[in-house]
Image: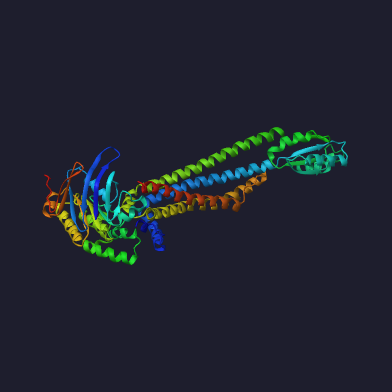
């Protein structure tokens, strides 16, 4: 599903965020990306949804080589990759329904299909009854669930999450994690960068630790491994 | 593999963009208001100024076109000599028309203008027979007069030397200044409006970023913004166009009545209002779309 070969990422300001990274993530896996701040986690994530290009090496996502992907074809990749952020990135002027439906509108889906699919997903995240509310009227946890709904509404093969629980209290974080587990059980690959030691140590999954731009550890059913 | 994204727009999608562009105007209420009022104010200024400039130009042209050379024919000239002089004058390339006016006709004109006291001169007419010469371009009048002076049967050729030349140079300056001012105003209007639109779009760069994240193509993102720009332009042109259409109707009536005594005539209602409002309309649409296009492009390519 996702494959990185000898990936190095240097930014124009001279910072080397990743160097010589080799990783293979199979379809249906659930992977935590852990490591100290500034170690390269975010760059790792950004390479997958082609926010950044590798300076050297190859990044393959669902058969697409992101390094050679033309600018105008980036949307093709983005439609196979759902993205969830710490700050939710919802459109504040659109209501819940519109925010989720948006991801289907851009792929020019039939209106009837959009309605059906959005309602299904809102049902899944338990916010069907708040479909007409604006993001600002909802709690942080609810907003994150909407962001997750948007990321999965078009059936992507992989969902990338960058600190999805970073802004949430512990109880809410567990709710969000349960949602990710449910999505993963349906066959969607999950790649999640996180600082949440408790979650990583409780919901045991593959852990890739990045330190100083290199992979320090890659364990099936690993633990967080750092003092939080 | 990658070509799937770039397909022709479905009618449904276009309707979606259409709907979305209207919704966005409403959602971004204050921004819409700011952009629309920027268009309104600048177009109104431009429009009013255009109306004034065009009319001044019309008055100036009218005055210039009244400039003529009066060729006094020597008293000794016979019919044949006059005919010869006329042909000589007509052979000057700049000359447009040559009209003959006998000294009797000239006297009648004076009596009409100045009163019947002058009919005393009917006994012994002191005037000359004249050719009234008009040049195709008013500016050629002085040179033409000088040439005509050389002809054998010309007594004098008068055109109000000093005054006419002063008038011409004044008109030239006035026109150039006006043209520069109009150009400057149009430029300011474009700049102000596209900047306002840029600011409203800048406030929505997060929206564009998110659209890109969920896999929207650049075209898909751009369309609603372009349509929004179009509506902003159209909405902004409403008041200026109405104001000029209504305002000029009354202004022309009121001023024409007062100034026709001074032989000053304004441009008629439709011949002025149609081109000016048409121009404002086109500027509004162009600026709206262009302003959006430029601003969105900046955020799409990052």
* Residue A50: x %, y % from top left: 29, 50
For the rendered model, the colour scheme is: rainbow
Q: x%, y% of residue A194?
A: 18, 49
Q: Position of residue B227 (x, y in %)?
A: 42, 55
Numbered-mark total? 0
Taking the spot 34% from the left edge, 47% from the top edge, the residue there is B203
Residue B89 visible within the image: yes
In the image: residue B122, left or right of residue B230: right
In-image side of A195 versus B227 (left or right):
left
Q: Quadrant of residue B91?
A: top right
Image position, residue B195 (x, y; %) = 42, 44
| Of A34 and A112, the residue lying toward us | A34
* Horizontal relation, residue A178 to residue B180: left or right: left
Q: Quadrant of the N terminus of chain B?
A: bottom left
- Whether residue A91 is visible, yes or no, is no
Picture quadrant of residue B167? top right
Q: Give above or below for B192 relative to A78.
A: above
Q: Who's the residue at 80% across and 37% down the image?
A: B72
Asked whether A158 or B295 is in front, the reply is A158
């Amino acid at each position: 599903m996702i494959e990185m070969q000898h990936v190095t990422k240097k930014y124009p300001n001279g910072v080397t965020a990743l160097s010589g990274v080799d990783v293979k993530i199979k379809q249906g896996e659930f992977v935590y990306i852990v490591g100290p701040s500034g170690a390269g986690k975010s760059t790792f994530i950004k390479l997958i949804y082609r926010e950044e290009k590798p300076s050297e090496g190859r990044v393959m996502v669902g058969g697409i080589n992101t390094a050679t992907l033309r600018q105008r074809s980036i949307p093709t990749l983005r439609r196979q990759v759902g993205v969830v952020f710490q700050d939710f990135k919802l459109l504040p002027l659109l209501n819940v329904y519109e925010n989720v439906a948006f991801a289907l509108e851009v792929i020019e889906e039939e209106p009837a299909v959009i309605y059906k699919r959005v309602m299904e997903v809102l049902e899944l995240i338990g916010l069907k009854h708040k479909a007409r509310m604006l993001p600002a009227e909802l709690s942080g946890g609810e907003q994150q669930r909407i962001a997750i709904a948007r990321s999965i509404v078009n059936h992507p093969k992989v969902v990338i999450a960058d600190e999805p629980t970073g802004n949430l209290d512990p109880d809410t974080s567990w709710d969000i994690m349960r949602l990710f587990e449910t999505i993963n059980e349906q066959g969607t690959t999950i790649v999640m960068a996180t600082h949440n030691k408790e979650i990583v140590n409780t919901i045991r999954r593959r852990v890739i630790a990045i330190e100083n731009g290199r992979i320090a550890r890659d364990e099936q059913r690993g633990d967080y491994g750092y003092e939080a | 593999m990658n070509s799937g994204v770039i397909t022709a727009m479905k009618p449904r999608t276009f309707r979606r963009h259409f709907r979305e562009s209207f919704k966005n105007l409403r959602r971004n209420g204050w921004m819409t208001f700011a952009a629309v009022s920027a268009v309104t104010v600048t177009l109104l200024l431009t429009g009013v100024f255009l109306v004034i400039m065009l009319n001044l130009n019309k008055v100036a042209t009218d005055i210039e076109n009244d400039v003529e050379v009066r060729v006094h024919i020597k008293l000794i000239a016979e019919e044949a000599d006059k005919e010869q002089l006329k042909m000589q004058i007509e052979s000057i390339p700049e000359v447009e028309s040559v009209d003959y006016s006998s000294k009797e006709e000239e006297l009648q004109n004076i009596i009409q203008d100045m009163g019947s006291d002058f009919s005393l001169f009917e006994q012994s007419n002191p005037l000359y027979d004249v050719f009234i010469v008009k040049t195709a371009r008013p500016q050629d009048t002085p040179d033409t007069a000088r040439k005509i002076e050389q002809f054998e049967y010309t007594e004098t050729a008068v055109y109000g030397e000093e005054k006419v030349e002063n008038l011409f140079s004044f008109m030239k300056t006035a026109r150039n200044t006006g043209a520069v001012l109009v150009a400057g105003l149009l430029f300011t209007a474009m700049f102000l409006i596209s900047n306002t639109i840029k600011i409203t779009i800048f406030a929505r760069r997060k929206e564009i970023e998110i659209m890109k994240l969920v896999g929207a193509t650049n075209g898909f993102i751009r369309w609603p913004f372009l349509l929004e720009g179009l509506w902003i332009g159209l909405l902004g042109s409403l008041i200026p166009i109405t104001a000029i259409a209504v305002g000029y109707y009354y202004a022309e009536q009121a001023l024409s009545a007062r100034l026709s005594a001074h032989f000053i005539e304004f441009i008629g209602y439709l011949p002025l209002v149609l081109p000016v409002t048409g121009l404002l309309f086109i500027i509004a649409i162009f600026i709206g779309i262009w302003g959006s296009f430029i601003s969105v492009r900046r955020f799409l390519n990052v």
